[in-house]
Amino acid sequence: MTVRSQEAPLVLKLEGITKRFGGLTANGDVSLDLGKGEILALLGENGAGKTTLMNILFGHYVADEGRVLVADPSGELDALEPGSPSAALEAGIGMVHQHFTLAENLSALDNILLGTEPLAALKSSRAPARKKLDDLMARSGLSVNLDTRISQLSVGEKQRVEILKALYRDARVLVLDEPTAVLTPQESETLFSVLKKLAGEGLGIIFISHKLAEVLASSNRVAVLRGGRKVADLQTSGCDRRQLAELMVGHEIAETAREPGEPGAVLFSLKNVSAGGGRDALRDVSLDLKAGEILGIAGVSGNGQTMLARVISGLEPVRSGELLLEGEGLGSLHARSMIDLGFARIPEDRHHDGIVGAMTVSENLAIESIRKPENQRFGLLRFAAMRTRAKEMIKAYDIRCQGEDSPARLLSGGNIQKIVLARTLETEPRVVLAAQPSRGLDVGATSDVHRRLLEARARGAGVILISEDLDELMRLSDRIAVIHRGELSNAEPTETLDRGTLGLRMAGHGAEDAA
């Protein structure tokens, strides 16, 4: 049963939506509505059907059963033409995807106007468009320089452009997928302040998020999907974090948090390392990682984290400086030698860098240890042994698949991450590089990732945790450093830091500004 938080006219109604992919029911008889001026949070595990449901709403998929009704400007609910994104846009539905769909070489204004004018138009109506956008920015607080190229804007500014694109088309319903995934805490607060203001003017808003704190702070109502079906529809004021987490996964979730510990000696170091080029370059970076500690690296996306991870993984040569393991210089490195030295990595992009989609689960689990005797003999792969070992790891890490011979590409993001974790941690590495290890994962999968990293710390491994999620960093890290424009701050004990200070430093303000 749906319990709306206010008696407002409906702007959107989904009735009995069912979508099947072969034998899998991605959405099963899901009904949902949204009131004018309401903010609805949509929660669920990875694979629960949230994205499928929103893709049906926006016309990317066609439902097997059910229909979508959208209010016209007069408030009358009309059935939306299925499978037509242009019909969804015309009906006043706007969508802001987690990965922005902007042309980096064009200005903010050009991006907003794309697709809004006839191809046969002799010239662009830029003056009226600029006036309308100026009015929208003044009303909403979504300030951005319309003449600046997208490539020169911050992540937060790019997101504002995406929202302005929807508002410029007179959207009455706005859908946002993981809107704060790459924002600083201050940018997140600003975003939700803007969304509340827009809702106050009558915009209906749906946002998908895995961050329960922002759901509780910013929504009027919460709908929860599990296994493709709606299992709860509640007023946010009557919810708490534990209740929502249990609704998402169907059982109680154990809290994972770092216990105080005594780190050992310095295990791994970077000394004045510079590498790469452009905005993502590293500039004279130094860090020390101790045995038995988790060193957190905070930063907004695109500030050098990817290059730092590539250097530590042996995928990027350094221009200057050196890497040391237990005080010994490592010289010229490559990925194979780093694995042989006891380094393991959880890559930022698990789909692109974590697996080979066409290979099986068992082959992906063995891929980084393929030269070891248990996996090959005289140059011939021991597939039976690989399958046997894979069965053990599938059980130990609860990898949900159709068996060890399943193609890895068919697995959900959370289960792909479990493959990476199993392959990475079962070798008991000395140094673990975990880059965005819980990005896009539901609360259950995130809890499992955190538990595994803490277990590695407990047995004496050094863990470098690169994350844009400050809650994750504060919960797991013994010390935290901030990376901004390729420069790394000194690492400080987590107990001496707070979210506000870290957020300011992520935005480029130094310690003296944060004090």
Image: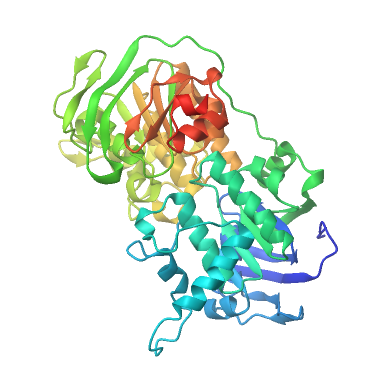
In this rendered view, identify the residue nearer to me: 512 or 5.
512
Hey, which quadrant is residue 311 in on the image?
top left
In this rendered view, identify the residue nearer to me: 288 or 28.
288
Residue lying at the far right of the rendered structure: 7
Hey, which quadrant is residue 13 in on the image?
bottom right
In this rendered view, identify the residue nearer to me: 265 or 447.
265
Q: Is residue 414 left or right of residue 71?
A: left
In this rendered view, identify the residue nearer to me: 142 or 445.
142
Counting from the top left corner in percent of width and height, residue 193 is at: 65, 50
Question: Can residue 402 be seen in the rendering of this structure?
Answer: no
Question: Can residue 306 be seen in the rendering of this structure?
Answer: yes
Which residue appears at 50% of the width and 30% of the height?
A: 502
Counting from the top left corner in percent of width and height, residue 165 is at: 52, 68
Counting from the top left corner in percent of width and height, residue 148 is at: 38, 60
Q: Is residue 319 left or right of residue 206?
A: left
- Quarter of the picture containing the N terminus is bottom right
291 over 65 or under it: above or below: above
Which residue appears at 46% of the width and 38% of the height?
A: 507
454 over 21 or under it: above or below: above
Counting from the top left corner in percent of width and height, residue 16 is at: 72, 70
Which residue appears at 70% of the width and 41% of the height?
A: 246
